[in-house]
Structures are given as structure tokens and as C-alpha cells.
Amino acid sequence: MKENYQKKLEQIISQKETQGMRLFLHSCCAPCSSYVLTYLREYFRITVFYYNPNITEDAEYQKRVEEQKRLIEALNREAEAAGGKPGCDEVAVSGASGTYAPSGHAAPYPIDVIEGDYEPERFFRMAEGLEGCPEGGERCFACYALRLSETVKRAAEGGYDYAATTLTISPLKNAEKLNEIGEKLCADTDVRWLPSDFKKRDGYKRSIELSKQYDLYRQDYCGCIYSKAERNKRENERK
């Protein structure tokens, strides 16, 4: 029987003791993080960790990381304009990203961001021998592990309570494998893995809506030269 990671997540955030705990959240891009941040910032003090060495072209990397920072700035401005103090009971306030504190339990916490090292050479070393794997196969699983291992390492060094990734919002990403890797990496640390399948409950649909509202650059391939080549191949076949 497949694990219901969305249900596991809901069980965790429903516990009063998790309110205001520190979450180190790996983000793959601004569009995917949009829904996740508006959802989880009512429960956690989030630090977004932008670490994506799989984006193998410098110009593409810079474009995506700037969009991530721009989104977070916008979300924090909205939260501040709502006038609530994090962790205090507030009346729900509507904003571009949706309704703050829909359950009335707390105003959204401010979001911090850390940009990791941009090291595509590390991705290429990891991909040796896996270049011919199709998207969604073993190369992608190794890429998950590369990004999440750095995430959990930084989370442990920073004394965070939880670690997670926005990657599970994508219909093209294997949520079961992502959670399996994250749980394994956290097993020998004091950091707890926050299970997720953010595409559930219309999470992916909501991320598309938020991308339009914030006018976010929405890429059409994962980031590496291999996924870009597959994208180009599909486009050529359609033509």
C-alpha cells in the first residue's frame, strides 16, 4: 500500500507543538515553491534553501534564483502589510497569494532565503554513466539525493527542526522516492524529515495560478542539459 504523504504532513502540522518550528525547505524554483510557501508559512518559520546544481547553464540558473528571491520578497511584503504578528491569533486577511490564516490560528511567519553554492560540476560528476537515462529515471533519483543531501546537511548544521523539498509538487517528480531519500538522510541527524506530496489537494494547480498572479518565469524543463535535450526532442517531434 502506497504511503499517503499528504496525510502524514497534515497530521504533523495539526499538532500544536509544531507551531513556529524551523523548517529548512529546499526549493527547486519559484513557481513550485509558491504554493508550498503560502501553505506552510502559517505553521513554520521557513528558510528557503536554493540549491540546484542541476541547472547547468549559468544564465538559466541566475534567472531562476532571482525569481525565487523576488517571490519571497513579495510574500513577505504581503504578510507585513496584513499587519499580523507571527504566531498570534489574527483575523483572516486576503492577499494575492490567497487568504492568510484561514483557520484563524496564526498570521504567516516571515520567510528567509539562503542561496547555496552554484556547482554544476558536482552535478556532472554525479551524472557520469547516467547520461542516457530517461527523465524520471535513475539519473533523476541521483539528482534528488545530491540536492537533498546538501539540504539535510545544512539543516543539521543550522539546528533546524525539519527539512523538506518543494520537488514533490511536480507531477513529473517521484514523491515516494523523494520522501524515501529524505527520510533516510535525516535518520542519523536531529533533523526530522517533513513528508509531503504537495501536488495533492490541487497544490500543483494552485502553483500555476500563483505563478500567473506573481508573473513568475515558469521554465519548461527541469534544468540540466539532459532534460533540455529531451524537451527539444519533443518540440521537434511536434513540429
Image (tube, helix red, strand yellow):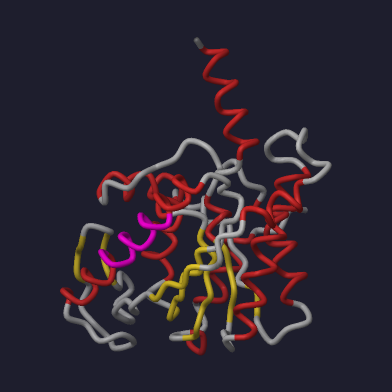
Q: Residue at x 21, y 82 (%)?
A: 84
Q: Position of residue 221 (x, y in %)?
A: 53, 37
| Chief secondary structure of the magenta portion | helix
Give whichever of 96, 89 is nearer the camera: 96
239 w.r.t. 150: above or below: above
Q: Residue at x 65, y 79 (%)?
A: 192
Q: Position of residue 61 (x, y in %)?
A: 47, 51
Q: Residue at x 39, y 76 (%)?
A: 112
Choose top left, top right, bottom left or bottom right for residue 187: bottom right
Give whichever of 210, 63 is nearer the camera: 63
Residue 33 is a magenta residue: no
- How many numbered badges does the structure rendering display? 0
Residue 72 is a magenta residue: yes
The answer to whether residue 23 is left or right of residue 148 is left
109 w.r.t. 118: above or below: below
Q: Position of residue 177 (x, y in %)?
A: 72, 54
Query: Which stretch is magenta?
Result: 65-74
Q: Residue at x 45, y 85 (%)?
A: 19
